[in-house]
Image (cartoon, coloured by chain):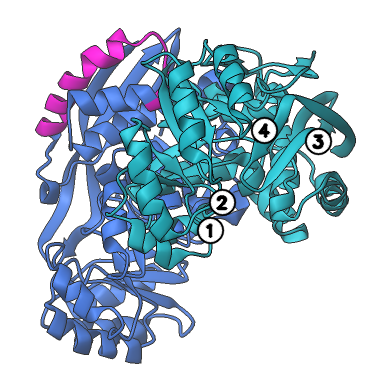
Chain colours: A cyan, B blue
Amino acid sequence: MKLTWETFTIRAKHPFKISRSVKQNVERVWVRVTADGLEGWGEAAPSRYYGETAATVVSALEQMQPVIEGAGDPDRLETLERDLEAAIRHNGSARAAVSAALHDLVGKNAGLPLWKLWGLDPAEAPLSSFTIGLDEPDVVRQKVVEAAEYPILKVKLGTDRDEEILSTICDAASPDTVIRVDANAAWTAREAIDRIAMLADYGVEFVEQPLQPVDREGYRFLHGRSALPIIADESCIDTASIQGLVGLVDGINIKLSKCGGPREALRMIHAARACGLSVMMGCMLESSLGISPAAHLASLLDYADLDGAALLAEDPFAGPGLVGAAIEVGDAPGLGVKKA
Amino acid sequence: MKLTWETFTIRAKHPFKISRSVKQNVERVWVRVTADGLEGWGEAAPSRYYGETAATVVSALEQMQPVIEGAGDPDRLETLERDLEAAIRHNGSARAAVSAALHDLVGKNAGLPLWKLWGLDPAEAPLSSFTIGLDEPDVVRQKVVEAAEYPILKVKLGTDRDEEILSTICDAASPDTVIRVDANAAWTAREAIDRIAMLADYGVEFVEQPLQPVDREGYRFLHGRSALPIIADESCIDTASIQGLVGLVDGINIKLSKCGGPREALRMIHAARACGLSVMMGCMLESSLGISPAAHLASLLDYADLDGAALLAEDPFAGPGLVGAAIEVGDAPGLGVKKA
């Protein structure tokens, strides 16, 4: 097998602002694994929050290259991914891209779309939310109007103008729009109690990552006192995070770029359910290629937030992902992704 | 799809005695699902301990029949198994047989052995233990001599002659034989402390199910005081059991006939690992057909006890299972099982 890659840039329609950062042009890495004339694809969406850039992705891919090139075929994915992790730890987005490419290749070899390889039913996928980043009230109002086709909005909060933003969104949205909030670790536990009570008054469904990931005592304090269910995002990296979240939160937000790919995501889904946690899957700003493995898994989720490609000005790939708020996958083998 | 079945009898070489029962001839149910000219097979190994007989299996199959016959194809296994569980709860061995047959069919459709469908590497499977049932010392000694090709013995205890039996086995076995003990829920927590200290003196590796499943306080008392790791068998039915065992035991023994099939077994493996529990897979007295799904999964296990067919006087099926203590699967699609 051969592993190759190239870096490309995607551009968000609007500057994408959350409590700690703002982005519009971001670098992604298109990863390809070839074997026997077939090509498997994956996308790395590095996150500065986890210490990743396109350059660290490329360095991680260089570490993984001999493992891929030494493996005869992609069939023994379980072992191969363990060997890849032994070659380079962490670097979730690079490992996720290689895992996606290997699964794409296995699916293409078998002539099966990934959802079918996994025995899933795409018709059971929940609708995806669409994210409204932080912005001035006028811009936020305009974004909500543009997002009219999405019945679930995920609202980024975590500033001193949270109520003003939320109130603007609730005014602009249709009355039956479901609203979820992501505070991206911006609050302390004591602040969170009041803020979440305010969110509950606005009919918000749940709140994601109110506190810093290190603030375990804060989560313990909040659990049972919070007016809304709490979903862990930055606090939940991979399977190893899950047991420690029991009694602290109500659910987890899995991202391929955190956990290292669809195989680990499947493990996380089963582990979270066994621990009584609800399961959400999120994404980064990424193309349809990056979104596609999550789209194949979506029927196993309680909540989906797979709008990464829908937020782009232009999508360099075409394949599984959102059609409106619906998650569509199709019947093409593997990931089913093509160049746009 | 069509679901059919027939009952058959298998006979153990020796009467198979554990702390609460003795068996030699047992009824099993051969389950077949047919679709598009292909046939998927499974075996139900009902357990009286869980209230099952061949007759209850047949009744459960009758409940599942309309669900199978109403499903267009076996591809959406996740949904189909949930619908089957909605049609008839519990009845693990009947559901396991149908799950095995559906996975056999999916593997045959894809032209892939199940280990390959799951991306596993059969070369990583641990060796299986071989079980020595309770018996008179002379018979036990003879069984150990006959089991010379197995480097790991699993010894059934839970009588007032435990030390005599164990000492007989240790005398008769090669000095580097690994010995595991299964008490089948025969002890109280206070008895267990001393018995397990005695087992540790004989170099036993771990002990399975020392206490009654209901005795959660006993397990809590034993945990940290036991001289050996404790594996839960009767205490661990399916994924829902796992979170409650954290802090009580060190590992779980998964059986297809308890949990309802290979799909749930995979979920259990991931959930147990996420909870820091080691993973064993066991079996019933059953033919190679019954053993085969576990054999395909075996590379994910820490400990395997898949000797059900090796204990038989005659095996009506041929396929994946033990070759000596090694777990072999081969490359035939699906389960890869034929009539012997």
**CB within 8 Å, label 1 to label 3:** no
Mark 2 vs mark 4: in front: 2
Q: On what subunit does the disc labeled 2 rest?
A: A
Specify the label residue A228 is tagged with.
Answer: none
Magenta-colored stretch includes residue A130? no
Name which of mark 3 and mark 4 comes first in the sequence: 3
Name which of mark 3 and mark 2 comes first in the sequence: 3
Specify the label residue A103 is tagged with.
Answer: 4
Specify the label residue A212 is tagged with.
Answer: 1
Looking at the image, residue B306 lies above or below residue B61: below
Amino acid type for the residue under numbered disc 2 = Glu
Name which of mark 2 and mark 1 comes first in the sequence: 1
Q: Position of residue A85 (x, y in %)?
A: 70, 56
Name which of mark 1 and mark 3 comes first in the sequence: 3
Magenta-colored span: B55-78
Give the class, few, some or many, for how many residues have Cα within 10 Å of label 3's Cα (few <14, many ≥20): many
Amino acid type for the residue under numbered disc 4 = His
Looking at the image, residue B280 lies above or below residue B109: below
Local SS, label 4: helix
Residue underneath mark 3: A28
For marks 3 and 4, give the CA distance: 19 Å
Q: On what subunit does the disc labeled 4 rest?
A: A
For marks 4 and 1, give the CA distance: 33 Å
Residue underneath mark 2: A234
Q: Position of residue B220 (x, y in %)?
A: 22, 75
For marks 1 and 3, give the CA distance: 26 Å
